[in-house]
Image: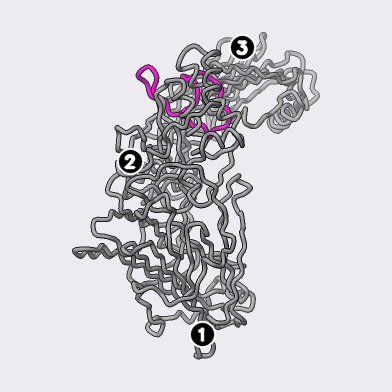
């Protein structure tokens, strides 16, 4: 169920009202039906008069109003200029329809923040939700004025996600209720009723007991039918649980709530703010049973024609599946219309082919229908691009998912394929398979979350090969570069649409190497080889670097660095953490360097690095040798996990810092100079 969001002109207080807004397949919030309605052609549109969906009424019977007289109001001025006195959410899933009541009480402390409370904005979905305003009160100098009859309501449709190709249809009700001065206390209460019809009256909610502003008193109470499932993720206020013969009541007692500091190194799939998840669904199997009919094959004549054309061009099921995937990725642009049930019910294939646009649901349904026409076994799988690795900790809810992909089975092997990706090259074996952590297959057999556990193989995603040839007559160096991008890196490179021959690409590399060697010029224009079978791209070019000293003698020292590698872990000062730390994953890089130092002189390379650093987080190997005038160096770095548990952070960081000892190499003609403090 979509919750409405309180918005101010100057300040946005997020996740105070109702359930947190969570997109599943492009749609916020929601509950779930025991059985899905049959997918049908839909034409969701705004009501002709959204005002009909807003009423003024007393609060619903389940609301227990908190007495402001019993609250302690902090006399200190709020740092933000707005004192949030009360944020109270009360929810009822035991009635005929879901209802979320929110009361918000705040005081502007300065003239600059008055405008933020002189009007209120409430967002809702006019297709499924109706909004009722219960009270608008303004207290000045101890005297409370009821302004409900003075409220003027305007409506606006603000498509804030349109730049991301998402059309939500959300309507904003703008409440204006007269003059507000610094020190006034504004008190507003409202209830949002309803849920998407796709859920057939079964409820599920997410609540976030968190804030971006200090709240003097925060309270939450949610009523559910007995037996509903719930879970609390993250560190938040204690949840009191009461269960009667008929009801489950979850409550956070009135208490102060402070903003949480941002944790820059917390993995994105962990809740930076606590999340309370409640659902009437008993298991993930129930959710799979609900979602399965939404993605049943939707065949028509055009799909049959496309499938026949693919079958004529490609002989094997693996080749046909890859061709069908590329057709959807290439020919269908991403655009999501998630008004009403559009966030859950996929657009029909005939409409997708007509418009040549669709979101992840539409693209996946089209892909599955093509595979069905080709007699290839496949089904949809619900995933979370945001929190996939931890959704197994959720109470069973479709709100755990924000994306849908396909699982294809050919030759006894499963392939996870994402029709929403930018066009991918390669065979079915070399196409990049996404890893979203856990997935819920809608195959009619599994009925449980599955760890995708993608096998990434041994091939690095990026290999940088550099061959340096030192001049025997001056201080210039010819540099031959081969930059190999494979798998996901090749996909990303193609999606940029770069023309490596247009000058800009070569100029960028020239500037980069000039920073290290003082000067750089292009000897051979960059060229690109795209191998769509191996799914790799090779960019090659030749530069002349150095020469800025203008000396007519060869260099007597030279240094190289493994700049083709990257950090696996962030550099944090304090390793004493209670929460996991993010690691770069997937990451598999290799840097190979060959240096022809030139014949006729003896070279010294102090401290040739040959080592291996390996732990549960990453693997690093380096080998270097000097054979006559040929210096070789190869370093490979591979991450193994996406997060580091708190108990291993300190050791992993210590190993990570050691990498800097092995990525820099110096060569000297003759004896290497001694370091300070060393005996010659």
Q: Residue at x 59, y 82 (%)?
A: 182
Residue 207: image tag? none
On residue 289, the disc is 2
Q: As rendered, which of 174 and 593 lies closer to the eye?
A: 174
In the rendered image, is residue 657 in sight? no
Q: Say if the magenta span includes residue 369.
A: no
Left or right of 525: which side holds 31? Answer: left
| C-alpha span from label 3 to label 1 | 89 Å
- The one of 653 and 550 positioned closer to us in this rendering: 653
Residue 146 is labelled as: 1
The image shows residue 7, relative to residue 159, as above or below, that is: below
Residue position marked by numbered label 3 in the rendering = 629
Q: Residues within 10 Å of mark 3 (few under 14, many from 20)?
A: some
- 428 magenta-colored: yes
Nearest to viewer (mark 3 / mark 1): 1
Where residue 2 sits: x, y (%)? 46, 57
Quadrant of res 384 = top left
**Stretch of the chain drawn in magenta:** 409-433
Magenta stretch, main secondary structure class: loop
The answer to which of 56 and 442 lies nearer the viewer is 56
Identify the residue at horizontal 37%, vertical 72% (top origin).
255
**Residue 406: where, in percent of width, then height?**
44, 31
């Amino acid at each position: 169920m979509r919750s409405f969001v309180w918005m101010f002109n100057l300040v946005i207080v997020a996740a105070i009202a109702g359930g947190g807004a969570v997109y599943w397949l492009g749609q916020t919030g929601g509950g779930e039906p025991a059985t899905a309605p049959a997918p049908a052609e839909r034409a969701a549109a705004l009501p002709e008069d959204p005002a009909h969906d807003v009423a003024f009424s007393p609060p619903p019977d389940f609301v227990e109003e908190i007495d402001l007289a019993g609250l302690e109001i902090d006399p200190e001025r709020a740092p933000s200029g707005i004192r949030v006195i009360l944020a109270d959410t009360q929810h009822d899933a035991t009635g005929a329809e879901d209802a979320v009541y929110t009361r918000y009480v705040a005081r502007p402390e300065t003239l600059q923040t008055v405008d933020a409370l002189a009007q209120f904005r409430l967002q809702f979905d006019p297709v499924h939700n109706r909004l009722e305003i219960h009270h608008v009160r303004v207290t000045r100098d101890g005297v409370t004025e009821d302004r409900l009859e003075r409220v003027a309501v305007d409506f606006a449709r603000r498509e804030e996600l349109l730049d991301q190709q998402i059309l939500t249809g959300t309507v904003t009700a703008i409440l204006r209720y007269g003059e507000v001065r610094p020190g006034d206390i504004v008190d507003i209460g409202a209830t949002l009723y309803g849920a998407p019809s796709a859920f057939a009256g079964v409820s599920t909610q997410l609540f976030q007991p968190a804030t971006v502003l200090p709240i003097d008193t925060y309270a939450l109470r949610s009523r559910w039918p007995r037996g509903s499932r719930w879970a609390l993720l993250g560190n938040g206020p204690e949840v009191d649980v009461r269960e009667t013969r008929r009801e489950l009541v979850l409550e956070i007692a009135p208490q102060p709530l402070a903003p949480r500091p941002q944790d820059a190194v917390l993995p994105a799939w962990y809740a930076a703010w606590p999340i309370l998840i409640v659902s009437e669904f008993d298991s993930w199997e129930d959710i799979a049973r609900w979602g399965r009919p939404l993605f049943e094959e939707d065949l028509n004549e055009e799909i049959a024609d496309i499938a026949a054309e693919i079958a004529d061009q490609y002989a094997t099921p693996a080749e046909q599946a890859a061709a069908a995937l590329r057709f959807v990725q290439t020919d269908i642009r991403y655009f999501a219309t998630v008004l009403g049930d559009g966030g859950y019910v996929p657009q029909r294939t005939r409409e997708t082919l007509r418009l040549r646009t669709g979101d992840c649901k539409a693209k996946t349904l089209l892909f599955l229908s093509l595979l069905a026409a080709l007699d290839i076994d496949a089904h949809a799988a619900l995933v979370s691009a945001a929190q996939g690795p931890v959704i197994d900790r959720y109470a069973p809810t479709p709100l755990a998912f924000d994306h849908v992909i396909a699982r294809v089975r050919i030759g006894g092997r499963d392939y996870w394929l994402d029709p929403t990706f930018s066009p991918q090259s390669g065979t079915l074996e070399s196409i990049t398979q996404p890893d979203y952590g856990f997935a819920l297959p809608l195959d009619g057999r599994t009925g449980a979350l599955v760890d995708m556990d993608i096998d990434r193989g041994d091939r690095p995603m990026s290999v940088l090969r550099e061959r340096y040839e030192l001049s025997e007559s001056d201080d210039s160096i010819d540099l031959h570069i081969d930059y190999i991008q494979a798998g996901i890196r090749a996909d990303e490179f193609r999606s940029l649409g770069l023309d490596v021959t247009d000058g800009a690409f070569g100029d960028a590399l020239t500037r980069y190497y000039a920073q290290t060697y003082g000067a750089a010029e292009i000897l051979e224009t960059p060229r690109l080889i795209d191998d769509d079978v191996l799914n790799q791209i090779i960019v090659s070019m030749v530069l002349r670097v150095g020469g800025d000293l203008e000396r007519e003698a060869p260099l007597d020292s030279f240094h190289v660095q493994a700049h083709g590698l990257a950090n696996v872990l962030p550099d944090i000062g304090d390793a004493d953490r209670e929460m996991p730390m993010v690691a770069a994953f997937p990451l598999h890089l290799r840097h190979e360097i060959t240096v022809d130092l030139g014949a006729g002189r003896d070279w010294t390379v102090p401290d040739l690095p040959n080592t291996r650093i390996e732990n549960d987080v990453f693997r690093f190997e380096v080998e270097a040798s000097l054979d006559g005038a040929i210096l070789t160096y190869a370093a490979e770095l591979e991450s193994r996990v996406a997060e580091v548990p708190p108990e291993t952070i300190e050791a992993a960081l210590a190993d990570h810092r050691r990498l800097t000892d092995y990525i820099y190499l110096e060569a000297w003609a003759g004896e290497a100079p001694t370091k300070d403090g060393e005996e010659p």
